Amino acid sequence: MAKPARGLPEGFSLDLPDEGPVDIGDFLDEAPPAFAARKTQKPDVQPTPTLSMPQQTFRPQIVPEREERVEEEAPARPAPRRAKATPSVIRYQLNLTPKAKKMLEELVEYVCMYSPETDARVSEVFQGIVGLLHNAMEELELAELPRRGAWGSVTAKNFPGALSEAFESAILRSASKRGRNAG
């Protein structure tokens, strides 16, 4: 089988106006496509063969009353929970460098190893870190931080370290104001 020729067909033309922009319209200006209605198939009704059996006549009878049995009630089902309007847990993506990911995993492992909770989750450890820093937020001095700079530059690579030092100083100042030992 021969391959079709590449490119546009020979009789193709764009018919663009020489002056002004092209008006291609809007999909809302077009009439909606007409859908063909489904044809419902009527089932073929075939006459059923009748058997030559004598028809029984219906004789009314009085049916004895049923005995009412007291059945054990089935255990009540718990009411299904309705979905909350807003979820209590919000999923959030955190992009980490391989080094930061390893540090976070080591921190979680350390918490699991030395705390009474052996199955602490990353989210729980992260919430603890964020809570600590949030409590020290009033002590954060961010005006002296160097600018991050372009991606891949030395200043961009040093920015997380500078943030870390600012966070540490704020936490220490906040702890000393609350009367905690800073050293």
Image: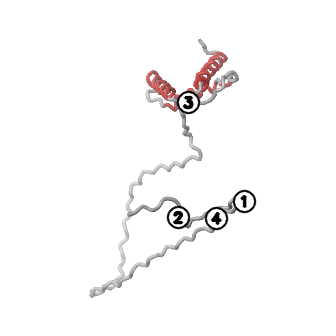
Residue at 41 percent of width and 53 percent of height: 74
Circle 1 packing at 10 Å, graded few (<14), some (14-19), many (20+), is: few
Q: CA distance from mark 4 to mark 3?
A: 63 Å
SS assignment at label 1:
loop
Front-most of residues 37 and 176: 37
Q: Amino acid at mark 3?
A: Gln
- Residue at numbered disc 4: 15
Q: From the viewer's perspective, is the residue at label 2 or at label 3 nearer? A: 2
- Relative image position of residue 22 (x, y in whole percent): 68, 60
Q: Quadrant of residue 29?
A: bottom right
Q: Which residue is mark 3?
A: 127
Q: Secondary structure at mark 4?
A: loop
Side of 49 relative to 93 (left or right)? left
Of the 4 image quadrants, the one containing the C terminus is top right
Please say whether residue 139 is visible from this viewpoint. no
Q: Sequence order check: which comes first, mark 2 or mark 1? A: 2
Reading the image, the residue beneath label 1 is 20
How crowded is the residue under tag 2: few (<14 C-alpha within 10 Å), some, or many (20+)?
few
What colour scheme was applied to this rendering of the protein? secondary structure
Distance of label 1 from label 4 (alpha carbons): 13 Å
Amino acid on which the number 2 mark rests in the picture: Pro
Q: Earlier in the sequence, mark 1 or mark 4?
A: 4
Q: Check if mark 2's residue and mark 1's residue have beta carbons within 8 Å.
A: no
- In the rendered structure, which disc, 4 or 3, sits on the residue that comes first in sequence? 4
What kind of element bears circle 2?
loop
Identify the mark nearer the N-term, 2 or 3. 2
Which of pointers 1 and 3 indicates the residue nearer the eye? Answer: 1
The alpha-carbon separation of the residues under discs 2 and 3 comes to 63 Å
Task: Tell me where residue 47 appears, x and y as whole percent.
Answer: 35, 85
First reached walking from the N terminus: tag 2 or tag 4: 2
Q: Sequence-wise, which precedes: disc 1 or disc 3?
A: 1
